[in-house]
Amino acid sequence: MRACDARLTRRKHETARGCRSRGHLLTVGWGTNGHDVLARVSPFQYILYIVRLGVNYAGKLEPADSAHLYDLKLRRAEKLEPARIVTPGSSPS
């Protein structure tokens, strides 16, 4: 499996040559416990920072997950399609 296959988000227009870093990635969504709100920030898609925005948050997130990429070449942000990683033996949620 290539490293880009394991990302939390995927771009609709991945190149056939493999994945390349085009910019900064930002996602917001629920933590694995379903109660914490987390942001994941990946500058240059090189290192990943996880920031807890809320602990035991009882409200709703609209939308439940959000992902954006700031494209350094085009100098614009684009919304990404959320994706889930499902490991063998687990059921998709």
Image: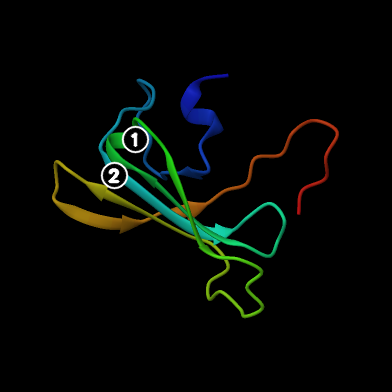
Circles 2 and 1, Cβ within 8 Å, touching? The answer is yes
Pick the residue in front: 34 or 1.
Answer: 34
Give the image location of residue 28, x and y in percent.
48, 59
Q: Residue at x 67, y 78 (%)?
A: 58
Give the image location of residue 79, x and y in percent.
37, 59
Q: Is residue 59 left or right of residue 13?
A: right
Mark 2 and mark 1: Cα distance apart in space: 6 Å
The residue to which callout 1 is attached is: 45
Return the disc, 2 or 1, that comes first in the chain's sequence. 2
Badge 1, how many Cα within 10 Å: few under 14, some, many 20+?
some
Give the residue type that dot 2 points to.
His
**Residue 16 is drawn in which quadrant?**
top left
Q: Residue at x 39, y 22 (%)?
A: 18
Give the image location of residue 20, x and y in percent.
31, 28
Q: Residue at x 29, y 31 (%)?
A: 21
Callout 1: SS: helix
Q: Is residue 12 left or right of residue 24?
A: right
Q: Is residue 19 left or right of residue 87?
A: left
**Residue 35 is drawn in which quadrant?**
bottom right
Badge 2, how many Cα within 10 Å: few under 14, some, many 20+?
some
Q: Is residue 10 left or right of residue 69?
A: right
Give the residue type that dot 1 points to.
Gln
Give the image location of residue 77, x and y in percent.
25, 57
Q: Quadrant of the N terminus?
A: top right
Pick the residue in front: 18 or 16.
Answer: 18
Callout 2: SS: strand
Q: Is residue 13 above or below residue 60?
A: above
Name of the residue lying farthest toward the bottom: 59
Q: Quadrant of the C terminus?
A: bottom right
Q: Is residue 59 above or below residue 7?
A: below
The residue to which callout 2 is attached is: 24
